[in-house]
Image (cartoon, rainbow, N blue to C red):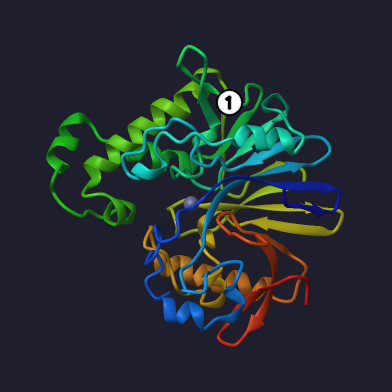
Amino acid sequence: MKTWHVGSFKVTEIPEFPIAVGLLDGVIAEATPDVVRGIDWMRPDFANEQGQTLWDVHSYVVDTGDQIILIDGGCGNGKSYPMQPSWTDLDTPFLDRLTEAGYSPDDIDILLCTHLHLDHIGWFSMKDSAGRWVPTFPHARLVLVRDEYERHLAQMLSPEDEESAAGAGADDDPIARAFLADSASLSKQTKLIQEETFDPIVEQGLLELVPTNAEVVPGVRYEQTLGHTAAHHSVRLSSEGRSAFVTGDFIHHPMQIARPEWSSQGDWDGATTGRNRRAFFEAAAGTDLLILGTHFTGAGAGYIVEDGEGFRLANAPA
Ligand SMILES: [Zn+2]
């Protein structure tokens, strides 16, 4: 299992599953196989010989010494995702891997989430032996940025609005455009996520909403990184003069380090994401900020260095 030390914090990646090769071909439209093959450092960690990008789904446990924090919750087992049928009703040994890493669900104190897409929230709940959805981490507060939670809630339409939106075709929401026919389908998907994942946490009084850029505990801070969703936040870790940055989908794939302006089809506002990525890399280049990529395969992490018209991920700080 991949682990990193950031000052006195220990970070462990908990794998959920590798995304099937080909499923996300074209999600970054400019990253055609020829282009990907032309960027040497993509292989073998982040792309295959055919120039297809590689992706996975994982979470991070951050052990600060005082608190044990899980960042992002993958897809979860047994969930209903009409938006993404191949991630519906999964059965992965994610919790066994958490145990292998030395943590039980009871140990987790805090859950953080970069944004509320279905591949970042699933493990926050699970089915108990009676088949009811319950919090997977019974003692953990789910600490969410208020604006991101409200964005999620706003996707749920009234039955009348769902009816009038049904079959209306692509709408203003890029996720709906990319994966679904219309906002009615997005609304139905969001209601399932609310029922299966968030309601059990709300009912236990474990949901806590915080403002943009909130420090959650000393050295663990949400950092607004807009564009993938309207209130997307990455997570910055700081301890004893060292720091790390959990990207979320702000950096969806390392190709976007090489070409910061190339946005994902799933972005709510690709132009904003691109601008924000370039500014972020300009500030990070040549520093010892450890980048932990939420969908990065292979080494999964590295340091930003300048490279031609873009940047690249290096094994050591420049
Ligand atoms: Zn994602």
Percent coordinates x, y for residue 217 in the rendering = 73, 40
Which element is circle 1 on?
loop
Please give left or right for residue 302 compared with residue 112 in the image: right
Q: Quadrant of residue 316?
A: bottom right
Left or right of 126 on screen, residue 101: right
Quadrant housing the C terminus: bottom right
Tell me if the residue at label 1 has its CB under 8 Å from ligand 1: no
* Farthest-out residue, bottom: 308
Residue 223 is left or right of residue 241, and the answer is: left
Give the residue displayed 26% in from the left and 49% down from the top: 180
Q: Residue at x 37, y 33 (%)?
A: 80
Instruction: List the residue tagged with mark 1.
Output: 136
Instruction: Please name the residue shown 82% across and 59% down the image.
Output: 242
Q: Residue at x 19, y 30 (%)?
A: 159
Rendered location of residue 89, percent (x, y): 41, 33
Q: Position of residue 58 (x, y in %)?
A: 59, 47
Q: Quadrant of residue 190?
A: top left
The x, y position of residue 99, in whole percent, is: 71, 32
